[in-house]
Amino acid sequence: MSQDLRAVEGIVFNLQHYCIHDGPGIRTNVFVQGCPLRCIWCANPESQKATPQLMYLADKCTGCGSCMAACPQKAIQRRADHPEKMCTDRTLCTACGACINACRADGRTISGKVMTAGEAFDKVAADKLFYGKDGGLTVTGGEALAHPEFTGALVQLCKAAGISTAVETCGAVAWQVMQPVLQHTDIVLYDIKQMDSALHKQYTGLGNEMILENLEHISNETDCTIIVRCPVIPPCNDSPENFHALGRFLVEKKIRVSEINLLPYHNLGEGKREQLEPGDQGFASRTPTPEEMEGHKNILRSYGFVVK
């Protein structure tokens, strides 16, 4: 059975060791490629599509043109406005990697590769000495449940080895897909972006009805520890009304919340978005002030929650 689990494949775009912000203790984070949402502030925009993505690092590009000559799809051309740099037609690019092998300046790379659950488990298990009583595995993304068979196999392997398991999810996944994975999960890091469904759809591409329903399912039908995580993104969701709505929902639905984490916006995703060559200006926000974050915390604390 364990060999069958080890052979299950998924697409992973990163694996980070010694993480301290995605669940309790020291954890190893496995980042799964693909996400059903399209959050305009996404910190990992290269992970949104479920297939490997070509990343172009313009600051390293020397404009030699070797990538253009190597591309079998003829997807690479010189930029009309900056002929010393290159641009990629993403409708033609298959992320085959030919341009990466041709680039002598390391100006191109691929985000996402096929990995088996066994390969990921071996890397997680190698860190077991550092986990102590609180740490362990966190599967995140993208969306941890974008490849549910892979994530399910990985958490089962870790549970069998005595390693604590956590899954971070946006919740926009059918309960029938989520439930089998959570049977082997200790902690759910559950993202709540915006309580108003119309605004949620405006900023993420989908309404929040399934997300809120799934949170009720997790609370009522599993033994998972629930940590609610809220990115704070001015002006998308940082209003007092939004945090009051969240507090009321959690209380009225009697959600078993261990704690709420507020995550202030950072712009680290913008550089990655540029590497995807989207051809637009991206998203602009700002980091909330400490005073603003304290105000948001106080609102949620007034509903009886531990807020960090």
Image (spheres, rainbow, N blue to C red):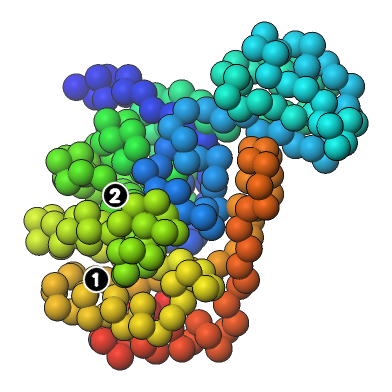
Give the left or right position of residue 192, taking residue 76 as reference: left
Q: Is the N terminus in the top left, top right, bottom left or bottom right quadrant?
A: top left
Residue 250 location in percent, x, y? 21, 74
Q: What residue sits 36% from the left and 88% below the top?
A: 299
Label 1, on which residue?
A: 257
SS of the residue at dot 1? strand
Q: What residue sits 61% from the left and 67% below the top?
A: 285
Residue 152 location in percent, x, y? 26, 36
Label 2, on which residue?
A: 172
Query: Within 10 angstroms of label 1, few (less than 14), some, or many (20 or more) residues?
Result: some
Of badges 2 and 1, the one in the foreground is 2
Which of the 4 image quadrants contains residue 4? top left
Task: Note whether residue 47 is visible.
Answer: yes
Outermost residue to the front:
80
Residue 174 location in percent, x, y? 20, 44
For the residue marked with disc 1, what is the amino acid?
Val
Residue 216 location in percent, x, y? 15, 62
Which of the 4 image quadrants contains residue 84? top right
Task: Note whether residue 157 is visible.
Answer: no
Q: Are marks 2 and 1 in contact (CB under 8 Å)?
A: no
